[in-house]
Amino acid sequence: MPTRPLELNSYYRLPWNLADNAITWLEPTTKCNIYCDGCYRENDPDGHKPLEQVISDLENIKKFRKTDGISIAGGEPLIYPHLLELVRYVTSQGWKSIIITNGEALTKDLVVELMEAGCRGFTVHVDSHQKRPDWRGASEKDLNELRLKIARMIYEGGRGKIFCAFNTTVYRDTLSQVPVLARWAQDHMDIVNTFVYILYRSEKKTDEFDKYVGGEKVDTSNLVYQLDRMEDHEDVVTQEVVDQIRTVCPDYEPSAFLNGTADPGTSKWLLALRTGNAREIIAYQDPKFIEMVQAGYHLLKGNYLAYANPSFQRRAKLMLPMALVNRGVRRTFGKLLANPARLFRPLHTQSIMIIQPPDILPDGRQNMCDGCPDGFYYKGRFIWKCRMDELEKYGDFVTTVPRKKLVPVDFDAAE
């Protein structure tokens, strides 16, 4: 049993939706330089798209969706031959360019080049189920060395002006390592602006559901997000990750969420924003603070905030004037005054996100992220990027239908 169950009704429901969202997913390539168990995309060695096609996708995004940032992903975008031109184009349209990468091809010189082209941030995915040539068999704790190397590279190459985030996929066998990651994120909140936990989901072979596309039964065993050796994998849920984080950060408290499409009582994206430093966390900001930031940014800019300025996040004391209108900031300010020594220490903000991808409910409904920021423009419509493999293999999304269990008839009783 969780020591402190999540209470979604007390959090701010993030206002992101299909037509008006903080970020939008873009895939200039499906070619990658490593293999990851948790990836939702099939690695295509010929997966580089012509720049003209990618720009056409962006023009369609502009028609249908307000957005603050474009997540340039893949595949591995750092090996896309037209990346610099693409970043320049995205920047010219008034969007923030965010590179979603595994970091293998990242160098300090490339950070500088991308920053000069207009790149505003990197989200680097590192976890122990990736097949990195120099890190085979490494634990999440071991990989913190790599994370720190990349974070410092981004900070130094970007002169502190580029946003730095890390993603990690949480599997049942790595759930116990979440506290190590949580502690590492706090230790480096001066250069790591966001840490994201993505909970692994597999299109498992089960006897519980039949799969259909357009009324025709299909075999989904060839979908990329299905691993034979993980058929017995037990899905991790958000509350379990929260409980693990609280073993080292006992005051951890979320403030905002996105719910599921089929079950509004589930959390799909869970956001916490904390203020402090490597030595201590002073406070977790309250739901009203997140609401004020999102609503205020939309009022001023016309879209919802995706990535805050990293310079501001490293100087959290700049938000103290908001104490006049926000109780949570007043509480933070009060804690600083209660211990004046804190006023002379660095004060940073850092966001912690937990993402719980699609779940299949017992009745067969697929519980997706309602208002998912990783929406992707695909052949005339916006889709969940995590299910694109279904469209490419079957032409439409897979529907799951519970198999009817035959109830044995007692013929003697019937007579």
Image (spheres, rainbow, N blue to C red):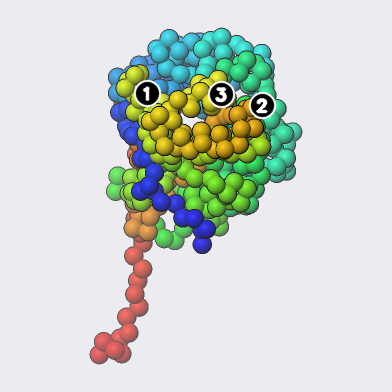
Q: Position of residue 9 (x, y in %)?
A: 35, 48
As measured in the structure, the alpha-carbon distance from the residue carrying label 3 to the one carrying label 1 is: 19 Å
Please name which of the two marks, 2 or 1, marks the residue nearer to the observer: 1
Q: Nearer the viewer, residue 405 or 116?
A: 116
Q: Which mark is residue 315?
A: 3
The kind of residue on which mark 1 rests is Tyr
Q: Which residue is mark 2?
A: 150
Q: Which residue is mark 1?
A: 297
Mark 3 / mark 1, whichever is N-terminal: 1
Q: Position of residue 1 (x, y in %)?
A: 51, 62
Q: Position of residue 333 (x, y in %)?
A: 51, 33
Few, some or many residues within 10 Å of mark 1 (<14, 14–19, 20+): some
Q: Quadrant of residue 164?
A: top right
Q: Is residue 366 above or below residue 325?
A: below
Q: Nearer the viewer, residue 335 or 397?
A: 335
As measured in the structure, the alpha-carbon distance from the residue carrying label 3 to the one carrying label 2 is: 22 Å
**Viewed as shown, does residue 75 lie left or right of 159?**
left
Q: Position of residue 136 (x, y in %)?
A: 72, 39
